[in-house]
Image (cartoon, rainbow, N blue to C red):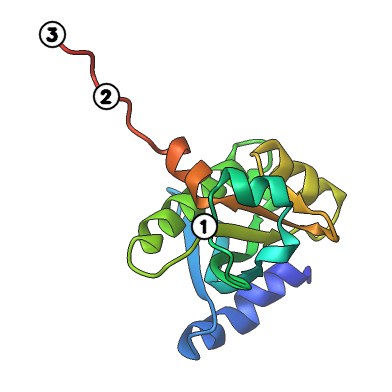
């Protein structure tokens, strides 16, 4: 059993009950689990973010800022090539953005388990931390722009 399958079958309900991670599951039309992800709170050391990005985002000079962690994201192999991973990530980002309005979160953080996952997140615009390249983040400001509804032209 793959670690991500094992997590969903053996650990996810415990994590939810103990409030250490909230799992979100995508179920297909035929009632199969197509994929899932988890969200939890995290922190980022401001010193771990490239200085030019700290300035660009106008982040405060606190030693640590709040973030949202996508702890796990997986899709069933039977759904390969159907954009399920993209859909799950978009849903996670949209939820994180919504939650950031109530509980401060300056970015979404992910830990890429391998090079393929790293590429997946990088293609969406996640930025690798210079000192830990398998850990990536996307500023909430960027996520907000992804979901911004363009205003209609004045008539």
**Label 2: which residue?**
151
Task: Depth check: give the residue in front, 38 or 6.
Answer: 38
* First-in-chain label (2 vs 1): 1
The residue sitting at 54% across, 65% down in the picture is 68
Note whether 95 is above or below 11 in the view shown.
above
Task: Depth check: give the residue in front, 53 or 108.
Answer: 53
The residue sitting at 49% across, 82% down in the picture is 16
Question: The N terminus appears in which quarter of the rendering?
Answer: bottom right
Say which mark, if any, is on residue 155.
3
Task: Depth check: give the residue in front, 11 or 107.
Answer: 107
Within-10-Å neighbours for mark 1: few <14, some 14–19, many 20+: few
Q: Residue 76: horizontal and vertical position, in percent?
A: 65, 54
Note whether 6 is above or below 99 in the view shown.
below
On screen, residue 154 versus residue 96, left or right, reads: left
**Residue at mark 3 to residue at mark 1: CA–CA distance:** 47 Å
Discs 2, 1 touching: Cβ within 8 Å: no
Name the element at disc 3: loop
The residue sitting at 50% across, 51% down in the picture is 140
């Amino acid at each position: 059993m793959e670690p991500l399958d094992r997590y969903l079958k053996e650990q996810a309900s415990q994590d939810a009950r103990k409030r250490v991670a909230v799992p979100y599951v995508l179920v297909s039309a035929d009632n199969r689990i197509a994929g899932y992800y988890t969200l939890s709170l995290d922190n980022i050391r401001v010193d771990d973010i490239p200085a030019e990005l700290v300035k660009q985002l106008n982040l405060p000079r606190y030693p640590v800022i709040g973030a949202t962690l996508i702890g796990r994201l997986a899709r069933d192999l039977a759904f390969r090539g159907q954009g399920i991973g993209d859909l799950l990530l978009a849903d996670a980002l949209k939820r994180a953005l919504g939650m950031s309005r109530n509980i401060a979160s300056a970015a979404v953080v992910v830990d890429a388990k391998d090079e393929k996952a790293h590429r997946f997140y990088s293609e969406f615009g996640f930025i690798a931390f210079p000192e830990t390249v398998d850990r990536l983040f996307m500023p909430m400001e960027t996520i907000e722009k992804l979901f911004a509804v363009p205003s209609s032209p004045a008539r």
